[in-house]
Image: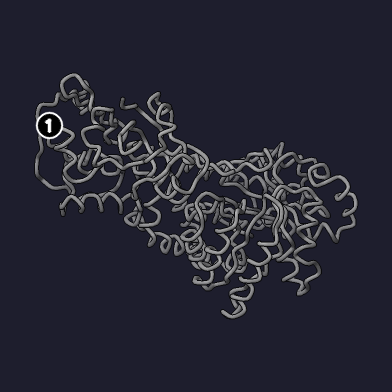
Amino acid sequence: MFELKDHDGLGRLGVLTVNEKSIKTPNLAVVVNPNELSIPPKEMMKDFGVDLIITNAYIIKNSKKAEKIERKGLHDFFNFPGLIYTDSGTYQMYSQGNALITNKETLDYQEKLGSDIHTPLDLFTTPSDNKKIARFKLEETVKRIKEVKTKNYSAPIQGGSYLELRKEACKKVSKLPATVYPIGGIVPYMINYNFKQLVKVIIECKNHLPLNTPVHAFGAGHPMVFSLLTYAGIDLFDSASYALYARNGKYVTETGTKKAEHLTSLPCTCPVCTSHKPRELRKFKYLVRHNLHALMREVRVIRQAIQEDKLFELVYSRAMSHPNIYYALRWLLKNKELIARHDPVRKRSALFWTGGLSDERPEIYYAMKQVKSLGFRKVPRPLKLVYPFGQSLGWSVNYSKKKYDDLGKLRLIADYQFGKGAGKKLIPKSVRIIKTRNQRLHQVYLDDELLFVVRARDGYCSLHSAGAERIKKYLKKVEAPEEFKKFYLKGRDVFAKHVVKCDDGIKPRMEAGVFVDKKLVAVGEALLSSQEMMGFNWGTAVKIREAIS
């Protein structure tokens, strides 16, 4: 079960529940090798906040500890109550040039080990594979996925550097009830810092995968790219880099790696760095722990950035650390239409215009598209009250000089929010406009009925029942079943699994009308986009503000 909680760009806050164990996303599956437990999983959970680990069935099967692990099961052996995800060993067999286990053997073995999410033996596709080979590996991988008999499994997406094959793979695996969709064959892009091609592959997959399932960037393990990939729609990462870098004397930061031997000051406040001197960080036991702290910290920073609607600012700051991340972000922003489709219509934080790629932000794209739809070449001055125009810093907006009275301002805001013509329908001349002590437009009444409130934070109209009734033909519609009408009339929210149909173009935090048998029964705030409402079976689609009897 996967439930969406919040959005920013294509980044998502969610909760993945498997076998009654729940984790937040985005999340990092920390790679654990039973032969080399540099940090015990129990310590990972207690001291680092790790609640998801991934281990390799192929390595375990060939381990001296195999019998003990098989007898105890993974959870008991690792003393880890969180989620355990098993990989099949595809990459190890690819790198060794041998196929020493069959698909059925690895799937049966993973079930025997008792992991929570199983992975079939996909065929690793390299960027150098020609199209014929890439297609064969894709088709064989899909065939192997279909052999999975267990409930919770991942469905790897292959196709190499051929985007049309990635599309084909996504369409095939999306018909299967997988728990996770890992995008495979991307490690070479990571190794070669080819982040632009990596993002191209991810966006192609996001365009053709169901929205109701987490997407995993298989092998993406450096924190410098976590925020970029999250903004592109990735929900899960996995990494052994914390240990691999430590073995090579590398100190991980969110902007790259440093040689531990060159450190004279520690640019980190994790428990390891605050209790040891730079020279001590050369020891593996300290360096490996710092590195894991660095990875987990970046995951938490990303979650908080999504919560604050500051993910773009975070990605942009990380892009300044490496030109290839910058170029990847620049290409990603060419997909403004896709990003804007799921990006909230209004944000909790001001938009910071910092030059460079700021003009390409989906928030600005959507806002200017709305202005043009009203027939304006310049931005009407009343929109200075509305996000993102009035809630931005550094953005130079070309406003028109035309002046408006209060009625004109409100009508223009309503047109911008609901569509051309909505303003006059919602706000007749006889309305009573209430202002705050600071003369800010606040409430609008018709006779004694409250039509809407102008939100102080973002300038948008927050409709009440009388206002919603007046412009119901302009409202984005969410249709729900008759059997749940009584709950909506009591102010209960609309769950995604109950949405029968909805209008295109609904964005998170947009005003939406709930209709039953073509009659408006409630008004509220959409928490999901149109595609998400139709795709998800869990979570709230519309948070109802007021019922309409």
Looking at the image, what colour scheme do you see? Answer: one colour
- From the viewer's side, name the closer residue of 270 and 131: 131
On screen, residue 342 versus residue 459, left or right, reads: right
Q: Residue at x 25, y 52 (%)?
A: 368
Q: Is residue 261 visible?
A: no
User: Above or below — where is 44 with respect to 131?
Assistant: above
| Residue 459 lies in quadrant | top left
* CA neighbours of label 1 inside 10 A, class few (<14), some (14 to 19), many (20+): few
Image position of 426 with respect to 210: above or below: above
- Residue at 31%, 55% in the rendered image: 359
Answer above or below: position of 528 versus 97.
Answer: above
Q: Is residue 288 left or right of residue 467?
A: right
In this picture, residue 130 sits left or right of residue 330? right
Which residue is identified by label 1? 428
Give how far across and how far down residue 37 sits, in percent: 80, 50
Residue 516, located in which quarter of the rendered image?
top left
Q: Position of residue 340 (x, y in %)?
A: 37, 52
> What is the three-letter code of the residue carrying label 1?
Pro
Q: Secondary structure at mark 1?
A: loop
When the figure is inspected, residue 408 is found, relative to residue 52, above or below; the finding is above
